Image: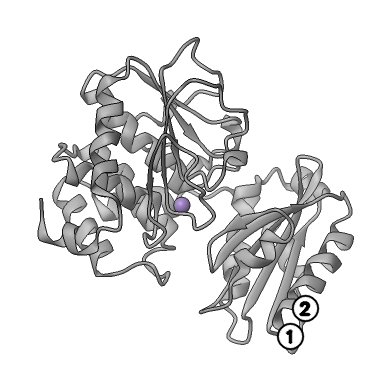
Amino acid sequence: MKKDFITNNKLDTSSLVEALNLIENARYILIVTHVSPDPDTISSGLALSNYLYENRIKHKVFNTKLSDIPSRLNFLPRSEKIVEEFPKSFDLIITVDCGSTSRFGFKLPEGVPVLNIDHHKSNNNFGTVNLVDFNKAATAEVIYDFFRFNGLYISKNTAECLYVGIYEDSIAFTTPRCDEFTYEKINFLVKCGADPSYIAQKLKQRESLAKFRILPKIFDSLELHQEGEVATIYCLEEWFKETGALVHETEIALDMILNMNIVKIAVYLRIQNGKTRVSLRSKKKIDVSQIAATFNGGGHLNAAGCSVETLDIFEAKEKVLKEIFETKK
Ligand SMILES: [Mn+2]
């Protein structure tokens, strides 16, 4: 075991051993990635998938809606193997990056053990075994710790997946939870064969024209409130239809408006699954997960999300703004 691992480990060591026991004793594993999948959940699922495949352990990676998976991740090894249908039988479920059971997109079958791997503060340890560390920048970091603690071999393919999960969830190594240990992990993953320049090209330089058609419309919706500290943007359903852009292609707009000097909280609203989906971002110590929680959502200090039960984006915007103003008082 490496020294860096011991000093930075917030995970219970017996859980790390039990997690491996569960995997080694399973005959068929279902890996569950969360609804509205982000790169961390997909990369984490695929990192495990590559490890299991290399060790001839039967499994499937599941997501409730394949078309929601950001297409820029399609270069990840085994990404083409993700399914949206349940295998007939399985005797272990591994959930990755799921902050609560509502993130699976289905009800957990009873009697099947669950290995819960995550880094969300909202995680209530719903698993049979829980590897949950909210000091980590990404779930991919927790999986890295699991591999290293148990002395498991990290192949080039697995390393590539872990690298992408950490890179994306730390917003290219810029969030507060990204620390010296994160960089040590990245260093090790590069030694294992992850190629930063290849990955950056695949993630960043394969964008669609539709994205550049929809972003100006979204920026046109920009409003500043409270002397510019709170910024809102939205995307109407018809704009998606007009341009052919996908929801995940628009999320960059939110990070961009937060980058404005005066803005401290940024809000992005759009219609998704019959409700108004709200994404929140903040700077420094402003906790947007609290605001999301008042609408039964969740997330992290600086990045959170929730849904408001209305198809009227403007009504949802007023409700969320009211909550933000109240909290800021
Ligand atoms: Mn994550």
Give x and y (percent) for residue 161.
33, 42
Q: Which mark is residue 50?
A: none
Q: Secondary structure at mark 1?
A: loop
The image quadrant that residue 153 belongs to is top left
Residue 256 left/right relative to 33: right
Which residue corresponds to the image point at 60% horizontal and 38% vertical from the top-left?
A: 68
**Type of amino acid at the residue the image marks with label 2:** Glu
**Type of amino acid at the residue the image marks with label 1:** Lys
Give x and y (percent) for residue 172.
39, 63
Give x and y (percent) for residue 314.
87, 62
Residue 74 left/right relative to 53: right
Give x and y (percent) for residue 324.
74, 74
The image quadrant that residue 325 belongs to is bottom right
Which residue corresponds to the image point at 25% horizontal and 32% vertical from the top-left?
A: 20
Whether residue 311 appears in this view of the structure is yes
Categorize mark 1 by other alpha carbons within 10 Å: few (<14), some (14-19), many (20+). few
Residue furthest out toward the top? 88
Q: How far apart are labels 2 and 1 at the CA level?
A: 5 Å
Which color mode does the image show?
one colour
Q: Decide: marks 2, 1 in contact (CB < 8 A)?
A: yes
Whether residue 216 appears in this view of the structure is no
**Is residue 49 placed above or below 284 in the rendered structure?**
above
Q: Quadrant of the C terminus?
A: bottom right
Q: Which residue is mark 2?
A: 326
Relative depth, front residue between 119 and 255: 119
Categorize mark 2 by other alpha carbons within 10 Å: few (<14), some (14-19), many (20+). few
Q: Which residue is mark 1?
A: 329
